[in-house]
Image (cartoon, helix red, strand yellow):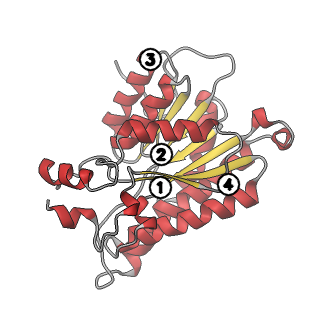
Amino acid sequence: MTVPSDTSAVLGRPTAVPRVVLITGAARRIGCELALGFARRGWDVAVHYGKSKPEADEVVAEIVALGRRAVALQADLTVEAQVVRLVPDCTAALGRPVCIVNNASQFDEDTAQSVGYEHLLSHMAANVGAPLVLARMLYEATPEAARSDEAQRAVVINVLDQKLYNMNPDYLSYTLSKAALQTATVALAQALAPKLRVVGLAPGLTLRSADQTPEGFAEAHRVTPLGRASRPEDIVAAALYLAEAAGVTGTTLVVDGGQHLVPSPRDVMFLTGV
């Protein structure tokens, strides 16, 4: 099966009144889990990807196999002109999105001793700029009737990080960008209501990174009050709740097994070995 990577063709059956979600970084890892979770719940899914076209095509095919519609949309989230296209392209392919999940993040290591403009600004563009522009585009796409008709309202879910509640200085540019996105979540919830709800979702350690050993990951996962941090199914369940919780806006749901309650002077990656 050849799966399109643009809006020229969409696979799957149409729905009378589709619920459409656009998920950034949906080709891999948690983004993939979110895409499939929303599809199982009856949503049609726009699968955004940056460079992972084969993986995005596979996710689209899996969603279609579940009986939902899907399309893969490519954009470099550090380039505003490409980000601006995503909501119109999603609308053309699947219909107006009523939910955007800002899942994609740049996550590169730096410290206070190594931080520089280029690294910091790249993180800010991808992790803050893109969610801000997507919220703006969703607001413009949501009809004015949504002010009085809750059924037409939309929601933005910004994926944050439990470390905002348990600060350490590692991955400094990433951390600063997520702190800015957390503040933006509140500001946007105030500015874009009632047409849009804007909420945050803060996972803990969920999936093993490429350079983390299975033993290190398992050890880190256990260092929480619940004896385990977040699992992919926890993040999916939380995102689905926030997508459908009409009375929730301007707040963040922390889903981490209580990881943020255990003080940590360094990122857990450095405390458990790699």
Q: Secondary structure at mark 3?
A: loop
Of the residues under marks 2 and 3, which one precedes in the sequence? 2
Amino acid type shown at disc 4: Arg
Dot in front, 1 or 3 = 3
Secondary structure found at label 4: helix
* Quarter of the image with the N terminus in it: top left
Please tell me which of labels 4 and 3 falls first in the chain. Answer: 3
Q: Give percent across and percent down for residue 196.
A: 72, 47
Estimate the spatial distance between the alpha carbons at disc 1 and disc 3, rounded to whole Å.
Answer: 28 Å
Measure the alpha-carbon separation of dots 2 and 1.
9 Å
Q: Residue at x 34, y 54 (%)?
A: 225
Q: Residue at x 48, y 23 (%)?
A: 40
Identify residue for label 4: 136
Quarter containing the C terminus? bottom left
Q: In 3D space, how far apart are the residues under numbered discs 4 and 2 (Cα atoms)?
A: 15 Å
Q: Position of residue 182 (x, y in %)?
A: 55, 63
Asked whether, in this view, residue 223 is left or right of residue 73, the answer is left
Q: Is residue 62 left or right of residue 144?
A: left
Mark pair 1, 4: CA separation:
15 Å
Residue 262 image-quadrant placement: bottom left
Q: Where is mark 1, residue-wise?
A: 77
Q: What is the three-letter code of the residue carrying label 3?
A: Leu
What residue sits right under mark 2 in the picture? 24
Above or below, 254 relative to 247: below
Q: Nearer the observer, disc 2 or disc 1?
A: 2
Q: Residue 14 lies in what quarter of the image?
A: top right
Residue indicated by mark 3: 66
